[in-house]
Amino acid sequence: MELSNEATIETFTHVVVRPTTFQQERPYKVAIGRLKEGVRVLAWITGFKLSEVKVGMKAKLVAKLTPEGRPTYEFIKLE
């Protein structure tokens, strides 16, 4: 099933105290966004300042690979 990539952010958090496996990462933001089809997705938030992230804002969901080759999802700014 093909899904759209436009999401509405429903909730988010800024993680400063990271789990051991993420200690090499800088503090990061993650969110749950609802796609137009009603599917909820958990993904990183990138390209936004913390002050810009708001519940109800629109974002674009993109699939990416980490430098280690692991698949991941990110919410980025709409173009």
Image (spheres, helix red, strand yellow):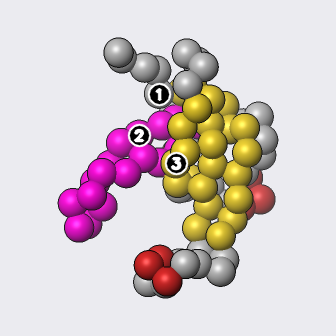
- Against 10, residue 45 (above or below) is below
What amino acid does circle 2 point to?
Val
**Chief SS of the magenta region:** strand
Residue 23 in view in this figure: yes
Sequence-wise, the earlier of marks 1 and 3 is 1
What is the C-alpha distance between the residues marked 3 and 2?
Answer: 9 Å
Instruction: Name the image quarter holding residue 77.
Output: top right
Percent across and percent down for residue 15 are: 65, 70
- Against 23, residue 42 (above or below) is above
Q: Which residue is mark 2?
A: 62
Q: Secondary structure at mark 1?
A: loop
Q: Which residue is mark 1?
A: 5
Judging depth in this view, the residue of 44 and 51 nearest the camera is 44
Q: Residues within 10 Å of mark 1 (few under 14, many from 20)?
A: some
What is the C-alpha distance between the residues marked 1 and 3?
Answer: 12 Å
* Mark toward the viewer: 1 or 3: 3
Q: Is residue 21 left or right of residue 57?
A: left
Sequence-wise, the earlier of marks 3 and 2 is 3
Percent across and percent down for residue 37 are: 55, 15
Q: Are marks 1 and 2 in contact (CB under 8 Å)?
A: yes
Sequence-wise, the earlier of marks 1 and 2 is 1
Instruction: Name the image quarter holding residue 21.
Output: bottom left
Q: Which residue is mark 3?
A: 43
Q: Which residues are magenta?
A: 59-75
* Mark toward the viewer: 3 or 2: 3
